[in-house]
Amino acid sequence: MRPAILRRPAPWILAATLVFASWPSFAQVELGIVGGPSWAGRQDLTIEQRDAAGSVIDVTQEPNLHVDRGRTFGLTMLRWSRHHPNFGLSLDALYWANSLKMAVVGSPGINRTLHQERIGLFASLAGRAPVSRSDGSYVYGSIGMGAVDSRLVGGDQRVAVGFSLTAGGAMPLVPGRLFAHLEVRYLITHDFDSDDTMNQNFEFSGSPSWTTARKAFSGHQDTRFLPLLAGLSWRF
């Protein structure tokens, strides 16, 4: 059985957001936007054929499917500590989309493209280190968790926990105010199912990989993504 924090992530994310927004020791704030391409690890697809009564009559498995490059957009907020300015908290709202091709059951040689969308809200611990004290550029990283809504376009959705790792760098465009960012994120999300209109149920899962820490997160928390993002942020 998964811990309660994994079964019900929303209250924890809400609590982290309230702490993030109100903690008086956090002074320097950066608000920004990011966007860029998103790569994904391979996925396993299980297709359940059902009769009119909803009973499973056949199961087809398509392991290790290639996922096409997609796109990611997001809003970010960073609050750096007044007393320890190289440490802070971040809150990120991300949208990303990818697609993959599956073989149509009963029609050899014919493929169907499935489009997936995800929306995630992540709260993270962040750290930074100056690159140049003269112009204010720095490198940074963060690690956190949140709630991710995974869905098949035109199908069902599921909200569950997700994990995020970030590494990047920032340089000022307007000294002390406007910064340009370049960062890479590593996102791990959960499996999900989706019924469609053809009496089929699709079960999506990440293909096995050492990069997903299956022993820690289980085999149902192994769908992975790698967005490469550029962005702008304004410091208050």
Image (cartoon, helix red, strand yellow):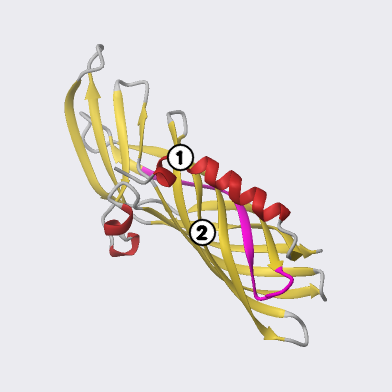
The image position of residue 155, as x and y in percent, is 43, 28
Identify the residue at image location x=18%, y=31%: 59
What residue is pinned by disc 2?
A: 144
Counting from the top left corner in percent of width and height, residue 69 is at 45, 54
Badge 2: how crowded within 10 Å, few (<14), some, or many (20+)? some
Q: From mark 2 to mark 1, how far is it between C-alphas?
A: 16 Å
Question: In front here: 225 or 89?
Answer: 89
Amino acid carrying mark 1 in the image: Arg
Q: Nearer the viewer, residue 89 or 156?
A: 89
Q: Which residues are magenta?
A: 81-100
Q: Is residue 126 covered in magenta?
A: no
Q: Position of residue 193 (x, y in %)?
A: 35, 34
Please provide percent x and percent y for residue 67: 38, 51
Q: Quadrant of residue 126?
A: bottom right
Q: Secondary structure at mark 2?
A: strand
The label on residue 8 is 1
Q: Amino acid at mark 2?
A: Gly
Q: Is residue 92 magenta?
A: yes
Q: Is residue 128 left or right of residue 163?
A: right
Q: Give the residue displayed 81% in from the left and 63% down from the top.
A: 236
- Would residue 213 be found to the left or right of residue 147 on screen? left
